[in-house]
Image (cartoon, helix red, strand yellow):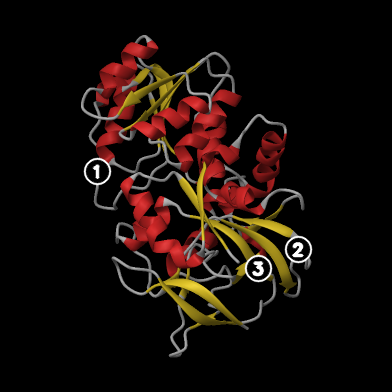
Amino acid sequence: MKTRGAVLTGVGGPLEIVDLELDPPGPGELLVRVHATGLCHSDLSVIDGSRIRPLPMVLGHEAAGEVVEAGSNAEFKAGDHVVLSFVPACGACRRCASGRQALCEPGAAANRDGTLLSGGRRWTLPDGTRPHHHLGVSGFAEYTVISDRSATLVPQDLPLDVAALFGCAVLTGAGAAFYSAEVKPGEKVAVFGLGGVGLAAVLAAVTAGATQVVAVDVVEHKRELALTLGATHEAAGGPDVVAHVRDLTGGGADKVIDTTGVAAVLEQAYAATAVGGTTVTVGLPHPDRTVSLPALNLVAEERTLKGSYLGSCVPRRDVPRFVDLYRAGRLPVDGLLSGRLGLHEINDGFAKLASGEAVRQVVVME
């Protein structure tokens, strides 16, 4: 079938909106009509070259839509509404078997190679070139083919522009707070970086019962938004932020979550963590960046530094959990939405994301 999609052909962009030929779904695959896809820094890092991916590529990894056709042996049917997540967990490797589906080995290999979980590609450009898939989703297209292992069923009455956010921002941010940091009632929490992921972490920390949530960012309107979403304090990012956070929390936060992907900010997040506390890093820095930390207090203060990918979540377990929290009014994810765009406006949307003007925009397909 023919569809339109946003293709990255070279580092630096821009994305090109082009006509594509899309092959039908194979065994265990789904043809999905995409309704909404979020603009995330993980897409931006591919555009600017911070994350090396094979090109050309149809971008977009945080999406929701409706199943149009299911290949043989697929777990879904036409008409199902699904959230697409960016790790197509095979369910059988040793990581999946241990409950760590975010670290699925075949899924990671497929994402690295720009293919579906089967190893195939389903796109063709008019000149015959076969573009790659982005993290098994490629949501910046009117229609896409995915592995059914990338999909989670959601209720029909859940707005699909909100549902898209559960595929990355909510899983990654809320999961980092609930599972990686294990925020407990009464704890003090700081979140560095207030994009969609960071604000989802703020929401989850509030839901988990943190008595103090310090929202940190260099952009003032993001800090103000965090306060409306339940943060108790805000702090401007910069050279004085560690002292400020430690002063606000009486010696450091019990749990600190860094979502920025900036090595120097991770060092600040670690320094802002209390004795006995846990620092969780979610953002993806450039591969050549390193972090320098004081080795002594890691032991003497029983400090913990953890990485968190996809919020340590299992999408088919956690998307329904988080949707239930949203529907109960306890995880107001729609507060993250800062704009809805048409596919033709996608490059302007990424410019706003890069400048810090926008938090979480979604491309809504006509």
Q: Which of marks 1 and 3 is nearer the N terminus?
A: 3
Disc 3 crowd rating (10 Å Cα; few below 14, some 14-19, many 20+) is: many
Residue 273 lies, in percent from the top left, at 36, 21
Tell me the quarter of the image containing the N terminus. Answer: bottom right
Q: Residue 329 versus residue 70: which sits nearer the camera?
A: 329
Q: In the rendered image, which residue does mark 2 sit on? A: 75
Question: Which mark's residue is nearer the viewer, 2 or 3?
Answer: 3
Q: Is mark 2 on a helix, strand or loop?
A: loop
Q: Give the residue type at disc 2.
A: Glu
For the residue carrying disc 1, how many other residues have a C-alpha within 10 Å: few (<14), some (14-19), or many (20+)? few
Residue at the spot x=38%, y=59% of the render? 348
Element type at marker 3?
strand
Instruction: Report the Cα–Cα distance between label 2 and label 3.
Output: 17 Å
Q: Pick the quarter of the image with the C terminus.
A: bottom right
Residue located at (41% from left, 17% from top): 276
Q: Residue 82 in the image: state x and y as whole percent.
A: 69, 57
Identify the residue at image location x=77%, y=53%: 156
Q: Which of 216 and 304 is in front in this view?
A: 216
Q: Name the residue under label 3.
A: 33
Question: Residue 107's mark?
Answer: none
Q: What element carries label 1?
A: loop
x 45%, y 36%: residue? 198
Report the residue marked by disc 1: 290
Q: What residue type is labelled 3?
A: Arg
Q: Is residue 133 above or below residue 204?
A: below
Image location (x, y in percent) of residue 334 = 59, 40
The quarter holding residue 335 reads top right
